[in-house]
Amino acid sequence: MNVQTAAKLPVFSLPQDQLLTLNVNDIPVMRDSLGPGIHFKPLLADPEGGVSAVLGIFAPGALVPTHYHTGAVHGYTLSGMWYYEEYRDQPQTAGSYLYEPASSVHTFVVPETNTEDTVVLFIVYGGNINFDEEGKFHSVLDAITLQNLIKMCSEKQGIDQVRYLKGGSVHYSTDK
């Protein structure tokens, strides 16, 4: 926290001695994290706040099976093209911003005809409840699962450390 600025304000603020910032160019790609051609760069995983942010990188033909969002999602497409199977007539292309309300259900598709990877910035509140082809529960992808996925992918790829922003840390206010 900038003590001089905070002292002038009529509110309390969290202490912050540095900006929490990353350069996505410095973050390694977690390859094939959720299946073939589904990669990501982790930006934020905050289990306590229930929010995560990733730069999703999807190869042509990549498919993220049907999933249910417990919270809202913001998506900004940087390159390529994708759509939800349920909304084929509304493809998302470079420059598209998408807001998904909580409780939405869909299947993420990148056409095989794409000539480049599709790159999307996703900010996810809550988690995804993932289902298999028969509609049966498969898994949960939330901020704590994301932290473990980062660890598993980096170990598999031989990456020593992955720098991303983590949420706060619950602790006691005082010792016993």
Image: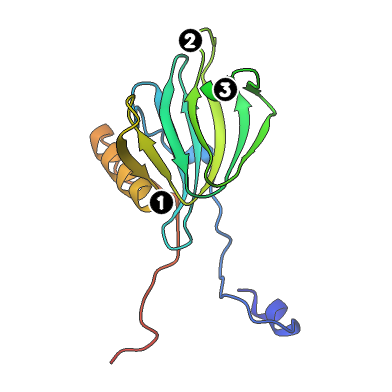
Displayed quadrant of residue 62: top left
SS category of the residue bearing label 2: loop
Q: Mark 3 to mark 2: distance in Å?
A: 12 Å
**Which of the two discs, 3 and 1, labels the residue nearer the N terminus?**
3
Q: Nearer the viewer, residue 3 or 123?
A: 123
Badge 1: few (under 14), some or many (20 or more) residues near its Cα, within 10 Å?
Answer: many
Q: Amino acid at mark 3?
A: Tyr
SS category of the residue bearing label 1: helix
Q: Is residue 141 left or right of residue 25?
A: left
Q: Amino acid at mark 2?
A: Glu
Q: Mark 1 to mark 2: distance in Å?
A: 29 Å
Going 26% across and 41% down the picture, which residue do you hit? 152
Expressed as whole percent of the image width and height from the top left, the position of residue 97 reads 67, 34
Badge 3: few (under 14), some or many (20 or more) residues near its Cα, within 10 Å?
Answer: some
The residue that label 3 is drawn on is 83
Going 35% across and 30% down the picture, which residue do you hit? 135
Badge 2: few (under 14), some or many (20 or more) residues near its Cα, within 10 Å?
Answer: few
- Label pair 1/2, CB-CB below 8 angstroms: no
The residue that label 2 is drawn on is 112
SS category of the residue bearing label 3: strand
Depicted 153 relative to depicted 145: above or below: above
Residue farthest along the bottom direction in this orientation: 176
**Which of the two discs, 1 and 2, labels the residue nearer the N terminus?**
2
Depicted 46 relative to depicted 87: above or below: below
Expressed as whole percent of the image width and height from the top left, the position of residue 115 reads 54, 9
Depicted 34 relative to depicted 70: above or below: above
